[in-house]
Image (cartoon, rainbow, N blue to C red):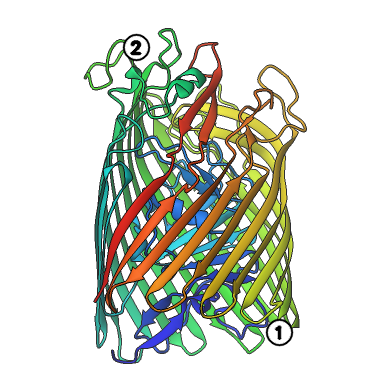
Amino acid sequence: MKNERVIPAVLVALASTASHAAPTGESTITLGESYVYSNSAGLQQTGSSVLTSVDVLGGDMLEDKNAMNSWELLGQMPGIQLTETRQGAESGKATFRAFNGEGYINGIKTLIDGVPSNVNSGNQRFIDMVFPLDLEYIEVVRGTNDPRYGLHNIGGNINFVTRQGGNYTDGRLTYGSFDFREVQLALGRESDNFAQNYFLARQDSNGYRDHDRSEKYVLGGKWFYTDDAGLFKLGLVTRLYHHEAEEAGFLTREELRASRTDSAAKNANDGDDRDMKQVAVHLDWQLRDDLAFSNKLYYNRYEDDRKVTFTSYPLGNAPRQRRQWDERQTGLLSSLTWQTSDWLTLDGGVNLEHQDNEYRRYRYAFDVPTDFSAPERIQNDDEYTLDNGGAYVQAVIEPIDSLKIIPAYRVDRFSGETHLPNGMDADLQDYGWIRQPKLSVVYSLTPDLNLYANWGRTFQILTGSSEPAYMTPGQAAFRPSINTGKEFGVKFRPLDGTEARVALWQQDATDEVANMPSTGTTVGLGKTRRRGIDMQVTSYINEQWTVWASHAIQEAKVVSAYTAGGQSLAGKEVFSTPRYISNLGMEYQPNRQWRFGLQARAQGDYYIDELNEQGKYGGFAVLDASVRYALSETASLDLQMKNLTDREYEYVWYDNFFWGGDDQPMFSPAPGRTAYLSMNLKI
């Protein structure tokens, strides 16, 4: 390959911490190895500096993992809460920093190859387009001091970076429990100035429960051109995704005790038909040795037709529903980086996004299946827009080799309107300019000991297709919820091949609102405080042994708020937030043929209601195991066992608005012990 260079992914990850100046220290921990292939010898990375708790999971820790859904891959990473709803295409979510995955407060920005990939509500549905064999690495940035992103970037962001360039032909064929079948094919070709990558995958499963079948397909293509000098790079990235899934439904306590695998008769017509598309043009241009220009122009399309039944209670508030989304996002991210001297780098950027969306929600009488064409009532038939303009500037200041100071400032502004079925038009809440100052510092006491601290502000605004996001008559005005976060951490190398990090953090929010646009449910949480301590270590003991461990202690409490009935919520924990998240893993490779792995994951129980009166649920501790045997240099077999001890656990939520007064917990059981056998080919 002409002018090819191979850059370890950890260096690329550190482009977000020290991409345009010599690094004096950093706070990133990397698990696994991966490589980015590039034929651009002079093109600089243009990510901004993020001196916070950053974790990178390499492609070798991802490519051979079996996962029904992409969010499950993040279970290997420290401090990640997995909310396993497992209702067809609405399968679950990954969150951190005490933001739960219920859908009320979507506090985590998700990206694919740096392209924003949240739907309007903030949910993470676009990441289902990415499969393990196509991933180069995953980067998780925690905290409030990253100025690159605004909307949904409340507690941090997750970037799924896919393979680009290189020459490879990789395939993976899997069969497993519940008639799970999956095929993945990844192809890369690079010659002279042109690189092309293709990906194809299909996955089918009958599911752990009755009425739980799932079929999904994904097709992707990437084409990149780089000039002879390696200073100019232009690329096109495309993805298509289709998913058809049945929904087994939530179970009452009595139904769960009777059978963990049954699906109630009420859910016989429930399911989802989902299509997603993503197209992005990438342009990176090294204008001068000290000046780099980066751009991403993207288009996202999300179409979803979901039929869902929450309750079998004939007089319930919402016996049967059909929800249809059609969202179109067009956006641009552009940044310019100027290395003015050895000690000062200036970085600034803008983003523009326009959303043109539709949301329809139909209700059916209890005895009428949702596949009938005539609903009993039209709850929503909304057409709405959302426009976001944002900009940031930051300076990377290195007065001495051991010190780095990064002040930053970001602003965002929003506008939009909705057209409701009654003919009414309404404008988006007027938040004005949302200002977000930030400051980060890292000091290297020694080459093996870095102290870092940061302070910053992020924000939450209301999303959805009608009130309260839009100002309908009688609707109260909302201010943006401002999150002020601070963190102090230490990263050190106690031994050769070992990295450890301890971080203390706190995040205070004003005017926080738990908002579920799909149901029109809004709960004011007022002032909240999230805080915790993250501890982790990764050790490459020798060529045979790798071990890693993490333990996150967290708390999310209401400081000042009241229920609709006037009851104080002060001191109550934010619902569905576990107090701890733990991870322990090891890999042992005695020789080139054999590799053995174990991973244990645990989450604590959580309250399921805002008053903390209904008890705690949802905790689990599971153990996964894997064995790989290399048949040759190009072929291998692996066996993976999930939930090896057959532990019974469930996702639990509190139904206090669908049951018409008969409020109760609802359960979605996780699978028991499962096994998967895969054939891997690398040509």
- In percent of width and height, residue 89 lies at 35, 40
Find residue 345 and report its image quarter: bottom right
- Rendered residue at 42%/39% (across/down): 671
Residue 255, labelled with which disc?
none
Q: Amino acid at mark 2?
A: Phe
Q: Determine whether 575 is above or below 287 in the image.
A: above
Q: Secondary structure at mark 2?
A: loop
Q: Secondary structure at mark 1?
A: loop
Q: Residues within 10 Å of mark 1 (few under 14, many from 20)?
A: few
Q: Determine whether 437 is above or below 22 in the image.
A: above
Q: Residues within 10 Å of mark 2 (few under 14, many from 20)?
A: many
Q: Amino acid at mark 1?
A: Pro
- Rendered residue at 72%/38% (across/down): 557
Judging depth in this view, the residue of 600 and 554 nearest the camera is: 600
Q: Quadrant of the C terminus?
A: bottom left
Q: Quadrant of the N terminus?
A: bottom left
Residue 366, labelled with which disc?
2
Which badge, 1 or 2, is on the more N-terminal residue?
2
Find residue 524 and report its image quarter: top right
- In percent of width and height, residue 451 lies at 75, 72
Find the distance from the CA under tag 1 to the CA under tag 2.
67 Å
Find residue 504 and report its image quarter: bottom right
Q: Determine whether 133 is above or below 176 in the image.
A: below
Residue for badge 1? 447
Q: Are marks 1 and 2 in contact (CB under 8 Å)?
A: no
Specify whether residue 218 is in view: no
- In percent of width and height, residue 539 lies at 61, 73
- In percent of width and height, residue 162 lies at 37, 66
